[in-house]
Amino acid sequence: MRIVIAGGHGQIALRLERLLHARGDEIAGIVRRPEQAGALLAAGAEPVVCDLESASVGDLVKHLESADAAVFAAGAGPGSGIARKDSVDRAAAALFADAAEAAGVRRFLVVSSMGADREPPEGTDPVFAAYLRAKGAADADVRARAGLDWTILRPGRLTDDAGTGLVTLGESTGRGEVTRDDVAAVLAALLDEPGTAGRTLELIGGDTPVTEAVKAAAGG
């Protein structure tokens, strides 16, 4: 497959790029800064420099043409303020979805966040609350698109521990941690499982091998 990943320099995205490259897929990763290109090349991905906060749909369509799938893994990241949570985590997700539809790329994965469907509890840090609201709005936008075979993945608290290959994946998992390695492995498996289209799935560490968990989520 040819897969285009928005946010190609992110920690999960780089892990995903390595996995996809190892299995023989062709990957393009969209990055904001030219100096990020080296990390993508090392992961086996083609770097595409394009700022999602200033790009047009047309700019992205030319990068998505001929792709078999698209993955939105971009985020404003730590240290960013409320405004960028909206411009990246919400608006850039909608822009990428617009471009995928325009380019005829139906398979569309989103890396979201657990808790994005609920109003943040009183006392939540304002920036984190803005992040959750932005993720929730982006997810709602993608879910409303008939032109995409979307799957939204909502991991629990992310860790940098080594992946176990064992997860809990479902519509509601409860709170928990999950390694970035295992999130990337689940995303790679979701790309191969069209039966998960139209599903919003939570993900934490667990006892089920990734491939079995994804197959079960697809109703298999």
Image (tube, rainbow, N blue to C red):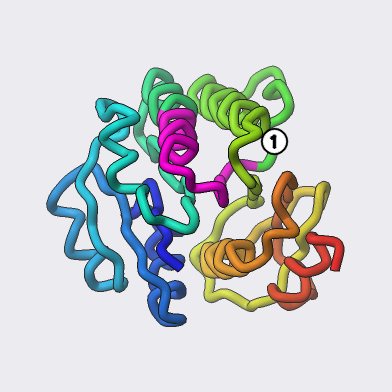
User: Which quadrant is home to the C terminus?
Assistant: bottom right
Residue in view at x 30 percent, y 47 percent: 63
Instruction: Find the magenta span and give its range.
Output: 92-113
Residue in view at x 68 percent, y 60 percent: 194
Q: Is residue 139 above or below residue 91?
A: below
Estimate the x, y position of residue 22 in percent, counting from the top left. 41, 81
Q: Nearer the viewer, residue 192 or 10?
A: 192
Task: Verify whether residue 102 appears in magenta.
Answer: yes
Q: Which residue is mark 1?
A: 115
| Label 1 Cα crowd, 10 Å radius (few <14 / some 14-19 / many 20+) | some
Side of 1 relative to 179 (left or right): left
Estimate the x, y position of residue 19 in percent, counting from the top left. 45, 75
Task: Verify whether residue 47 appears in magenta.
Answer: no
Q: Quadrant of residue 52?
A: top left
Furthest-left residue in this view: 35
Residue in view at x 26 percent, y 29 percent: 55
Estimate the x, y position of residue 214 in percent, counting from the top left. 73, 66
Side of 139 relative to 60 (left or right): right
Residue in view at x 86 percent, y 62 percent: 219
Q: Quadrant of residue 92?
A: top left
Q: Is residue 116 above or below residue 190?
A: above
Q: Nearer the viewer, residue 85 or 215?
A: 215
